[in-house]
Image (cartoon, coloured by chain):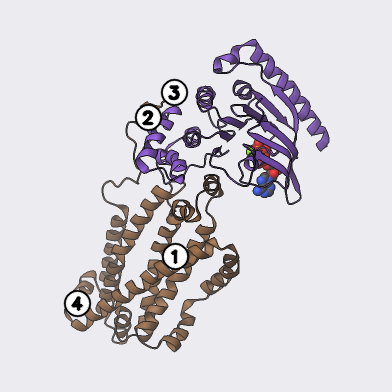
Amino acid sequence: MSAQPLIRSHDVTRRFGAVEALGPLSLHGARGEFVSIVGPSGCGKSTMLEIVGGLQRPDSGSVFVAGVPLEGPRDETAIVFQDSATLPWRTVLDNVAFSLEARGVARDERRDIARRGLETVGLAAFAAHYPAQLSGGMRQRVALARALVTEPDLILADEPFGALDEQTRLLMSDELLAVVDRLGCGVLFITHSIQEAVLLSDRILVMSARPGRIVDEITVPLERPRTSEVLSSTAAAECVSRIWALIRREAQVAMQGAS
Amino acid sequence: MTLSDSALADTPVAPARPASRGVPPPLVLGIGLLAAWWAIAALVDSAVMPTPVTAVERLLVNLQSTRFLDSAADTVLRLLTAYVGVAVVGAVTGFLLGLARFWAAAVSPLLYAVYSVPKIVLFPLFLLFLGLGDASQVGFAFFSGVLPMVLLVSAAAAAVPPLPLKLAASLRMSTPAVITKIVLPSILPAFAGALRLTFGLTFLGLLIAEMFTGVSGLGYELLRNVPLVRMGDIVGEVVLVILIALAPAIGLRTLETRVRARFGTTTEGDGR
Ligand SMILES: Nc1ncnc2c1ncn2[C@@H]1O[C@H](COP(=O)(O)OP(=O)(O)OP(=O)(O)O)[C@@H](O)[C@H]1O
Ligand SMILES: [Mg+2]
């Protein structure tokens, strides 16, 4: 990993009233590195993502992004939220262009860029549609395109493919890998799918049940650039079953702790 | 599903609008009611219940008189003044109230309390403070419409969905940009609904005020004819009131449907 990581959090905690939602949690991620987080529902994954995105402040601990203490949202970070967050009154094209509009990019230019972004996610034909005319998975692709068009150095994605069917999920994973390689950006990626985590990630962090901490870390032994074809390799299959074993143990511990 | 989905995408553009085919149901109902009126008028004593023809005849005669025309014009002008006031003052107040949680929490219960009081009991106050003329009539009409406008708009402004706001925050949008690009479009459907609802309430308030204090206006004309038992005139005026209300009501309804289709999170109407 490079000398100065893109993200470094140290002992981050967050509580909501009496609920200890998160931590203490420490993680790091480098430029160009794809890091996935898997963990049980409600363990604080979205919370951690929003903290790294500068949308929430941790109650204690520190977060550095690009070597600077995080004070709030930064321009070079793009967030894909767990629900697609499309604006119903804007066309698909103008939804994608929205992130550029916020940066003050001129109308024609941002629409050109947005059109290319829509091609990346396979929705060029739907530019003039409204979100209500799209399926949930398609809306999620709009949100992904909106994040990608700003050419971020850090992408924070909260289960962006959760609503997609298996085939589209694989195709989108390939597209995401290609874009990430082109931009050379770091990615923090939340998913419920172990296969997806193995396909996409350089490193996978396994979180405990709430309050979420990192309990395991797996380095994926697969070369990049890669495509969804690696999933049929024995190395990938071994990796998936190893993570399964880890998570099963974690789930058992969590259940015993709860009873 | 392929990645391009292009087969589905031949005809894109605006959200679907309810199809209007053949005779619109409201028109059918209107004609039906007219027929019923006619039948009843034919069955009962015509001195109490004039036929549509008599009513319209009386209306046409009245419309020849300058005094009556002036009265109708007065009503329309007062209605316009009050309604513009309701729309502007109500929307701005409601919007600010919705954004300022503290004030919304402090003021809303009060507004609901006042709203639930039958407004007519407060009319003497208007007379006391605004006198017998236009001011108290317009004031009362305004008062009849403005509270629902404030309540509906402030509820919508307070209920802007959090996710678009989070998105805006992550994009570091300025507060004015958040207001124009997210908050205002989000509350537009509620505002359109409130515009439709408050029009009727404002008009009702005005007619009542005119009945009590007028020296002109359709409300005054209506009541003036009661002791004289001029049923043809009265019903003729009711027809005129309906006609005056009809065009804005249909227009506002259409506006609301379109705004909801374009700006609403879901495409359904409100079923009323
Ligand atoms: N704004 C909030 N107010 C109160 N509690 C919250 C808030 N946000 C999150 N929590 C709580 O914090 C915990 C972690 O929530 P979070 O959304 O981060 O979980 P998650 O790991 O993303 O779950 P999922 O996989 O279901 O999306 C949950 O118990 C949740 O109830
Ligand atoms: Mg979550």
Mark before the other along the chain sequence, 2 or 4: 2
CA distance for labels 2 and 4: 57 Å
What type is the residue that disc 2 sits on? Leu
- Chain coloured brown in the rendered structure: B
Which secondary structure lies at badge 4?
Answer: helix
CA distance for labels 1 and 4: 36 Å
Question: From the Cβ of disc 1, is ligand 1 less than 8 Å away?
Answer: no
Quadrant of the frame with the C terminus of chain B: bottom left
The residue that label 4 is drawn on is B63
Q: Tell me the quadrant of ligand 2.
A: top right
Mark before the other along the chain sequence, 1 or 3: 3
Could you confirm whether marks 2 and 3 are on the same chain?
yes
Residue B168 is left or right of residue B251, and the answer is right
Question: From the Cβ of disc 4, is ligand 1 less than 8 Å away?
Answer: no
The chain carrying label 4 is: B
Question: From the Cβ of disc 2, is ligand 1 less than 8 Å away?
Answer: no
The residue that label 2 is drawn on is B8
**Which label belongs to residue B2?**
3
User: What is the total number of numbered labels drawn onto the structure image?
Assistant: 4
Where is residue A105 drawn, in percent x and y? 41, 42
Could you confirm whether marks 4 and 3 are on the same chain?
yes
Q: Quadrant of residue B75?
A: bottom left
Chain A colour as displayed: purple
